[in-house]
Image: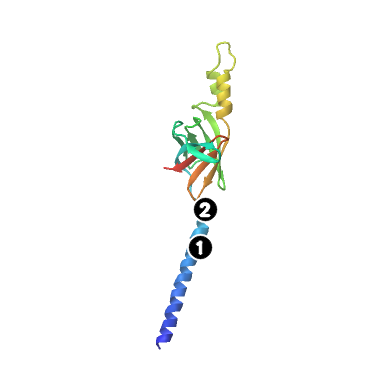
Amino acid sequence: MLGMEQKRANRHLIAILGFGILACGIAFGFRMLHGKDLSGVWKGIAYKKDGGKYIPDEAIGDFVIVLDAGGKYSENGNETSGTWTQNGNKLTLVPTTFHGLTADENRQRYRKKDGSASKTMESLLKNRMQTMVIEYQPEKDHLIFDEPTLRYEYARI
């Protein structure tokens, strides 16, 4: 009699364990398919690249990217704002304004006295109004933007 109750208890434990594993598998699959919503405020720091090592560069200061759920963003590193889209773990930031003005508005505002375009403003627009592709690392919940000499790593606030 005792052996039969033991077998029933073992089957019951195996069923509970199987159900738990199944539930964890479903939750993990749901997480992988849907991922986290990336909208919110992200604070980043810059790292200098030195021979494969990353050294924090505190002299540059902190950077903030604000991603809203409607597909708009603003960031203080390049002083740009625009639209963002997500494709898997890649975010694409497409700037539409620099210092609150479009590229044409900046050109009009910062013309030389002779009416020609300001070379400084043209250089700033060329460097700052570029599309940025940022990698999302779900295991760390970080955004990573790499440049040839610097790496920017953003964490959710």
Q: Which residue extends farthest bottom?
A: 1
Residue 33 place in picture, x, y as percent: 54, 54
Q: Which residue is drawn at 46% across and 70% down?
A: 17
Q: Which numbered circle lies on residue 25?
A: 1
In the rendered image, the quadrant that contains the C terminus is: top left
Q: Name the residue under label 2.
A: 34
Q: Which residue extends farthest top?
A: 114
Residue 60 place in picture, x, y as percent: 46, 31
Secondary structure state at the residue bearing disc 2? helix
In the rendered image, the quadrant that contains the N terminus is: bottom left
Given residues 2 and 18, the one toward you in this image is 2
Residue 134 place in picture, x, y as percent: 55, 41
**Mark toward the start of the polypeptide (2 vs 1):** 1
Secondary structure state at the residue bearing disc 1? helix
Q: Which residue is drawn at 42% across and 79% down?
A: 9
Q: How far apart are the two marked residues, 2 and 1, measured between alpha carbons?
A: 14 Å
Residue 50 place in picture, x, y as percent: 54, 37
Q: Which residue extends farthest front?
A: 51
Given residues 10 and 66, the one toward you in this image is 10
Q: Mark 1: few, some, or many residues within 10 Å (few <14, many ≥20)?
A: few
> In which quarter of the view is residue 10 placed?
bottom left
Q: Which of marks 2 and 1 is in front?
A: 1
Look at label 2 and name its amino acid: His
